[in-house]
Amino acid sequence: MPEKTFHIHTIGCQMNVYDADLMANALMAMGYRPVTEPEAADLAIVNTCAIREKAEQKVYSLLGRLAGLKRQRTTMRIAVGGCVAQLAGKRIQRRAPYVDLVFGTRALERLPELVRRLDAGEGPLCDVAGGEGVMEMDGPRQAVVQPRVSRFVTIMQGCDNFCTYCVVPYARGREMSRDPGRIVAEVQDLVADGAREVTLLGQNVNSYGNKEGLCGFAELLRRVAAVEGLERIRFTTSHPKDLSPALIDAFACIDRLCDHIHLPVQSGSDRILARMNRRYGRQTYMDLVTRLRAVRPEIAITSDIIVGFPGETEEDFNQTLDLIKTVGFDGLFAFHYSDRPGTPACRFTPKVTLGVKRRRLEALNELQNAATLARHRSLVGTTVAVLVEGASKRCDQLDPHGGEAIQWTGRTSSNKIVNFSQPSSTEVPPANVGDLCQVRIEAAFAHSLLGVRAPEAVGLKGEACHAA
Ligand code: 5AD
Ligand code: SF4
C-alpha cells in the first residue's frame, strides 16, 4: 500500500504547537508522512483555537478551503482537533458535513485509533470524551513543527482559575500536572535530539504540582536546569496571583533560566481586575515587577491586555495606560474583548462598542510600540548572545560588511528576535544552528534586531554587554 501523507494547520498558542508535534509523531509511527501543503495530504488536520472569536472564524474559513480540495480529491480526509473541536463537537460536522473526524483536547492519545477507523472506511467520527490527553503520552521525539533547537514541553494541562472572560477551563478541562520525572526524561530526550532550549508550558505554570502534591514549579525548574547539554530554559504562562517567592528566587539562582517572564496583567484597573476574577490588584502586580527586577535587573517583562472588557470606562482604560507606562513592558499582546459562549462575562453589561474597543486598542498599541522600539534602539551598539534557530526568512539583505548574504535568526535570552549576518573576516568562525553566538546589534526595528556576528568571549550569562 502506498505511504499516506498528512498536513497539520495549527492555530493558536504554543500548547497547540506542542500538540501538533504529538499528533505528527503519532501519525508517523503509523506510517504517515508529513507534507508541507494540504493539497498533497491524504489527511488534513486543523488544530484549532477558541480563545477569541477571530481564531474561531479562521477555523471555518480554513475548513471551507479544505472542502474545495476534497471535492477535487475525494479520498482526502479532513480532521478537526484542539479547543474548537472540544467545545463544538458534532456541531462542527453539522456546519461542515465534509469533516470526517472531530477529536477533542483530551482525545489526543486516541488519534491513532481514530485514524485507523477512518482508514478502514468508517466515518464521520467525533470523539470529545474525557481522557488523560498529554498526561500519559510520551512527548514528541521528533520536531516536525517546532524548531529543533528550541522545543516546547507541556508540563500541565487545563486551568482551574475561571477568569470570567476565558474559555480555556471549558476547552482544556481541569488543571492536571505531569509527573516531574517524566518531564525531566522528556527534556533529556529532546537535548539528545539537538534541543538547546526548552520552554515549559502550562496555562498557569506557577501552580504546577500543587493539586497533586508534586514538587513545586521552582523545584521543577531546578531539576530541568540540571539536564546536561541544555543552555536555556523558558516558561509560559504565569498567573500573577500564584507567582511565588520561590519562583522569584529561581531567577536569582538559576543561570540557565532566561531573562524573560510573560506575566499577563489583563488590565490596570482594580475594578476591572475584580470583574475578571483575576484575584490580584494593580499594586500587587507592580510589586511583583519590582521584586523580579531586584533579583534580575535585566529581566524582560511581557504581558497580555484585554481592552473593552464589559463595563470598562475611559477611567479604567486610562489606569491600564498608566500601568503600562509605569511598568515599562518589553512587549505586549493586546486584544479587544470578545464574548466567548458559556463564560460568565458574556452576561456582563454594559458591553463596550466595537468602535470604542478599536480606538482603545489602537491607543494602547501606539504607546507600547514606541516603548518597544525605544528598548530595541537602546540595544544598538551592544553585544548580545543569540541562540541560532535557523536561516533567516529575509536572506535578501546583504551584509553591509561584505560578508556572505546568508542571515541567521535566533533569540536573545530576553526573547528578542535577532537576525544577523556573518562577517567575512576569518577570526569569526561560521555559525551553525544550535550555536550560542555573540552578535553586535547594528539596527533596531519594531519586532526584531539586526546585527553582525562578533568575536566570542563577550557577555555575561549570555546577556547584553556594552562592549565597544
Ligand atoms: N477576549 C479577548 N481576549 C481574551 N483572552 C482570553 N480570553 C479572551 C477574550 N474572551 C486573551 C487574554 C489571555 C490571552 C491568551 O488571550 O489576554 O491572556
Ligand atoms: Fe484563562 Fe485565566 Fe486560566 Fe489563563 S488563568 S487560561 S486567562 S482562565
Image (cartoon, rainbow, N blue to C red):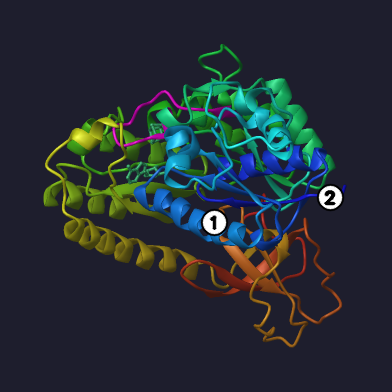
Q: Nearer the viewer, residue 339 or 379?
A: 339
- Which dot, 1 or 2, sits closer to the camera? 1
Question: Does the beta carbon at disc 1 come under 8 Å from ligand 1?
Answer: no
Q: Nearer the viewer, residue 468 or 406?
A: 406
Q: Mark 1 points at which residue?
A: 67
Which amino acid type is shown beneath numbered disc 2? Glu
Magenta residue span:
155-169
Q: Is residue 338 visible?
A: yes
Where's residue 418, x and y in %? 61, 66
Q: Is the magenta stretch mostly helix, strand or loop?
A: loop
Mark 2 crowdedness (10 Å alpha carbons): few <14, some 14-19, many ≥20: few
Q: Is mark 1 on a helix, strand or loop?
A: helix
Q: Where is residue 363 in the image (x, y as percent from the top left)?
A: 25, 63
Residue 437 belongs to the span the image colors magenta: no
Left or right: residue 265 versus residue 220 is: left
**282 shown above or below 10:** above
Q: Few, some or many C-alpha atoms within 10 Å of disc 1 (few <14, some 14-19, many ≥20)?
A: many
Q: Quarter of the picture for ligand 2?
A: top left
Q: Which amino acid does label 1 sit on?
A: Ala
